[in-house]
Every structure is written in structure tokens, then in C-alpha cells.
């Protein structure tokens, strides 16, 4: 597991500028949350994040698990919120997986496809400010082995040994055999698969390593190629969720604090068949129940959906409805609530957009190495916020505001600073709405801001 460098610890001015440029590019091009530095432009959901931080990552998730339903309209900040939770989970050393659910690519009623998506998306925090996350269950295992090996080798160098590297390999091998391979796990084959991959990587047994990696990713592998490693089960739809539980159990076995599974329902059309809807409901009910036991150890399970899910799908399944229905959303006064409602934020629409505008202004100044008149631009941000909040479109006003505001800042940089008239701001917002409408008609499922 590689040593990580927190964003706050980045001291190089050039790296800071590059990070700001990345954020600005993502916001200006598509109004999408950035891959890195999402907290720099986060506004309005801090109360939810504080509860997750203090009540869950620092306490509850150290000994148990939790399920939360994230509710928000398309364009209402669900993806952005999941990215914020992912960064928080990384800061606490958790393994994370952000998975987009859709009927064609990854339907939640297909347990095997869900497992495969998670196995490909699990990651620990990147090693540097711009290092891409190392995705996939196999690389997760390799990083852990590398980290263990490096620490063991360093410890042996301080002792009177002839070959610190050889002794370190023996120590890690002993840990895998005596500790990891005996950890609680529902599937013997899954435990052996992860332990065997780690052992094969440690001893440079490439053939076994490749076969076990393919098996863990849910790819078809001849049984004869993995049987010698103690793997006797086939991965499939019948045991997909069992293996997903096993993954979280083995994360703990390998010495990591826990897992954050973040599912994002990206399909706008929730009119699924009765059979599929029933399977989805039953799967969610099982996950909620499992979070109350120790079968999903130290796991945060977030499921992000539009409000129609609670209105049109959940009421048909009383057992699920009873578990999800809550009189109040998550808050300091109700930290146990299952619902995170992104339609109820810390700030009203105009105030939130004003603050967002000023955060983007700071990023813009850093990215472009310039300085604006803060009082003037605060006034302009307010004009844009009012124009965006008062204009109702099917596409959420936050994304429209972000794109229009970045465009306006570039214009102010090139042509000189000036006050922006409310009519001009409304015209820019309206133009942005036309572009987003064309994207929607073309079937572009953008990430919400």
C-alpha cells in the first residue's frame, strides 16, 4: 500500500496550480465534479459530511456497518456528494468503490454484475496529488503486500541479519499463512483466492497470480487452473452478493480499516419490471439487515437514487419501506437516520450558489495566476446565483450556474472586470440550458454536480 500525500500537504506552487487547473477544466467543460480536489468547491452538504465523519468513520464504522440512502434529483449533486464521501473514506484509510448502476451495464438486481463492478473499482487513496487511483482488487492486494514487505524489510535492516529482503519475504509469507488465511470469511474459496494471489505475487508466481486475478474479477477461468490454490467455487449470479460480503471481510483480514461502497443510480427511467423491482428491493433489504450484523464488517454502504425511488418503488415492498422510511433526514440531531436528502441542504439555493461562486473564483485565481476585485466578483456571483436559482429547468440549476460562471470569469479576465447585468446573466444561463437540453436529447448521462 503506497504512502499517500494529502491534498492539504501539497506544498509545490506548481502542483497547486495544476490541481486548480484540473478543477477549473472539469467545471468549465461539463459542469462536472473534478476527479481530484472536490472538497475545494464543495458547498451546502457539509452537515451531512460532518455527521458521517464524526459518527461513522471515527466511531461506528470501526466496529460495525451502516446503510444510507442518498436522495436527490438528477443534477442535484449525488455524484458530487459520493466523490466527497470517497475522499473522506480515503483519508481514514478505507477501501472505496464508486459504482454507477444502470440496467444495461450494471443492474442492481444482478448480483454477479454488481460484484464484478465493485471488484474492478475498489481502490485506496492515490499515492500523490495527481496519481490515478489504483483500481481493482488485484492491485489492492499487491499494494498491501508491497507495503507490508517494505515495512518488514526496514525492520530487519535494523537487526543483525544477513539478507533483510529474504527475511522480510518470510515474515510476510508467515503473516499471509497464519493470519490472513485464517480470517473469518463466508467463502473458503474467496479467502483462498485473495490469500493465494498475495502469496503468488510475493513469490513471483506469475501464472498463479494471473489465474487468481481473473477469478477474483469474475472472469471465466478453467477450474483446474485455480483448484491447486484452494479455490473450488465458481463465481456467478447465485453467489454474487456472498462474494461482495467476502470482499469486505477480507479487506479487514488484510489489515485495512474498512470499505465504503458507493452506488450511484444513473438511469433516469425507474420504470422497471415488477420482477426486477422486487429483486432490487429484496437485495436492499438484505444489505440493510446485514449492516446490523457482522457480515459487512466496517462497511459504509451508500445507495444514491432520485426521489421517485422512495415514492414509486419502495412503497410496494413493506419490509423495505419500514427500514428506509424516516421522519427526518440525517443530521446532528438524528445521526442514526438512514436518509441523506440532498434536496435539504445547509443553505438556500441562492446563498449556496453565491458561496460556490466565490470558491470557484479562488480556484480560478490560482489556476490562472491572476487576482480579481473580490467585492466586484462577489456582486457578480450574486447576480448569477439569483438568475440561476430563479430560472426553473428540468436540468438542475447548479450545473448551469457552474458552467456560466466559469465562462464569465474567463471573459472578465480577457476583457477586463466589470459589473454583470442581471439580464446578461439570465441570457448566459438560458444559453447554457439550451446546450444541456441538447445533451439530454442525445442521451448524455452527465455526472451531476
Image (spheres, helix red, strand yellow):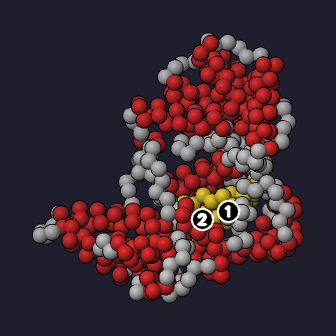
Q: Residue at x 30, y 71 (%)?
A: 204
Question: Would residue 392 appear left or right of 342 to someone viewing this image?
Answer: right
- Residue 332: where, in percent of width, then height? 68, 53
* Label drawn at residue 446: none
Specify the quadrant of the image occupied by residue 171. bottom left
| Crowd class of label 1 (few under 14; some 14 to 19; many from 20; radius 10 Å) | few
Which residue corresponds to mark 1?
105
Tell me, yes or no, whether the two marked residues, 1 and 2, touch with CB atoms within 8 Å.
yes
Q: Residue at x 71, y 63 (%)?
A: 104
Quadrant location, the C terminus: top right
- Residue 115: where, in percent of width, then height? 60, 70
Q: CA distance from mark 1 to mark 2?
A: 9 Å
Quadrant location, the N terminus: bottom left
Front-most of 207 and 191? 207
Q: Upstream in the sequence, badge 1 or badge 2?
A: 1
The answer to whether any part of residue 379 appears in the image is yes
Task: From this view, report whether residue 31 is shown above or below residue 131.
Answer: above
| Crowd class of label 2 (few under 14; some 14 to 19; many from 20; radius 10 Å) | many
Question: Would residue 123 appear left or right of 345 to someone viewing this image?
Answer: left
- Residue 56: where, in percent of width, then height? 59, 61
Q: Residue at x 67, y 62 (%)?
A: 105
Q: In what element is the residue under mark 2?
A: helix
Front-most of 333 and 294? 294
Q: How many labels, in total? A: 2
Front-most of 22 and 235? 235
- Residue 435: where, in percent of width, then height? 76, 34
Specify the quadrant of the image occupied by residue 308. bottom right
The answer to whether any part of residue 296 appears in the image is no
Which residue corresponds to mark 2?
117
Amino acid at each position: 500500500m503506497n504512502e499517500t500525500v494529502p491534498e492539504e500537504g501539497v506544498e509545490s506552487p506548481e502542483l497547486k496550480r495544476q490541481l486548480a487547473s484540473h478543477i477549473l477544466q472539469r467545471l468549465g467543460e461539463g459542469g462536472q465534479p473534478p476527479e481530484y480536489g472536490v472538497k475545494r468547491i464543495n458547498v451546502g452538504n457539509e452537515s451531512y459530511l460532518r455527521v458521517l465523519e464524526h459518527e461513522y468513520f471515527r466511531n461506528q464504522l470501526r466496529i460495525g456497518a451502516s446503510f444510507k440512502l442518498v436522495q436527490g434529483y438528477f443534477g442535484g449533486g449525488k455524484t458530487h456528494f459520493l466523490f466527497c464521501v470517497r475522499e473522506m473514506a480515503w483519508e481514514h484509510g478505507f477501501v472505496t468503490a464508486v459504482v454507477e448502476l444502470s440496467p444495461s451495464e450494471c443492474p442492481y438486481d444482478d448480483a454477479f454484475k454488481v460484484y464484478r463492478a465493485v471488484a474492478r473499482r475498489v481502490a485506496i487513496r492515490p499515492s500523490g496529488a495527481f496519481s490515478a487511483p489504483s483500481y481493482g482488487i488485484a492491485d489492492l492486494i499487491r499494494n498491501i503486500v508491497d507495503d507490508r514487505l517494505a515495512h518488514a524489510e526496514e525492520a530487519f535492516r535494523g537487526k543483525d541479519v544477513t539478507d533483510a529482503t529474504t527475511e522480510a519475504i518470510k515474515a510476510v509469507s508467515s503473516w499471509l499463512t497464519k493470519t490472513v488465511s485464517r480470517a473469518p470469511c463466508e467463502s473458503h474459496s474467496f479467502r483462498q483466492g485473495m490469500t493465494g494471489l498475495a502469496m503468488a505475487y510475493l513469490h513471483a508466481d506469475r501464472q498463479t497470480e494471473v489465474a487468481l486475478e481473473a477469478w477474483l474479477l469474475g472472469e471465466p477461468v478453467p477450474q483446474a487452473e485455480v483448484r491447486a490454490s484452494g479455490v473450488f467455487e465458481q463465481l456467478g449470479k447465485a453467489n454474487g452478493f456472498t462474494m461482495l460480503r467476502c470482499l469486505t471481510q477480507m479487506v479487514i483480514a488484510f489489515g485495512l480499516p474498512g470499505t465504503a461502497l458507493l452506488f450511484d443510480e444513473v438511469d433516469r427511467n425507474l420504470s422497471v419490471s415488477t420482477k426486477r423491482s422486487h429483486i432490487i428491493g429484496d437485495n436492499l433489504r438484505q444489505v440493510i439487515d446485514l449492516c446490523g450484523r457482522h457480515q459487512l464488517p466496517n462497511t459504509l454502504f451508500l445507495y444514491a437514487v432520485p426521489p421517485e425511488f422512495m415514492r414509486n418503488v419502495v412503497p410496494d415492498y413493506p419490509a423495505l419501506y419500514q427500514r428506509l422510511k424516516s421522519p427526518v433526514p440525517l443530521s446532528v440531531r438524528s445521526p442514526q437516520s438512514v436518509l441523506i436528502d440532498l434536496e435539504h441542504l445547509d443553505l438556500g439555493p441562492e446563498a449556496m450558489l453565491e458561496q460556490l461562486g466565490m470558491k470557484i473564483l479562488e480556484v480560478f485565481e490560482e489556476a490562472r495566476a491572476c487576482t480579481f476585485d473580490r467585492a466586484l466578483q462577489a456582486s457578480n456571483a450574486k447576480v448569477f446565483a439569483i438568475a440561476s436559482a430563479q430560472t426553473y429547468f428540468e436540468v438542475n440549476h447548479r450545473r448551469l450556474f457552474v458552467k456560466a460562471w466559469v465562462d464569465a470569469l474567463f471573459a472578465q479576465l480577457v476583457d477586463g472586470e466589470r459589473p454583470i447585468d442581471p439580464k446578461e446573466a439570465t441570457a448566459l444561463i438560458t444559453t447554457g440550458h439550451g446546450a444541456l437540453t441538447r445533451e439530454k436529447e442525445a442521451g448524455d448521462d452527465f455526472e451531476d454536480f
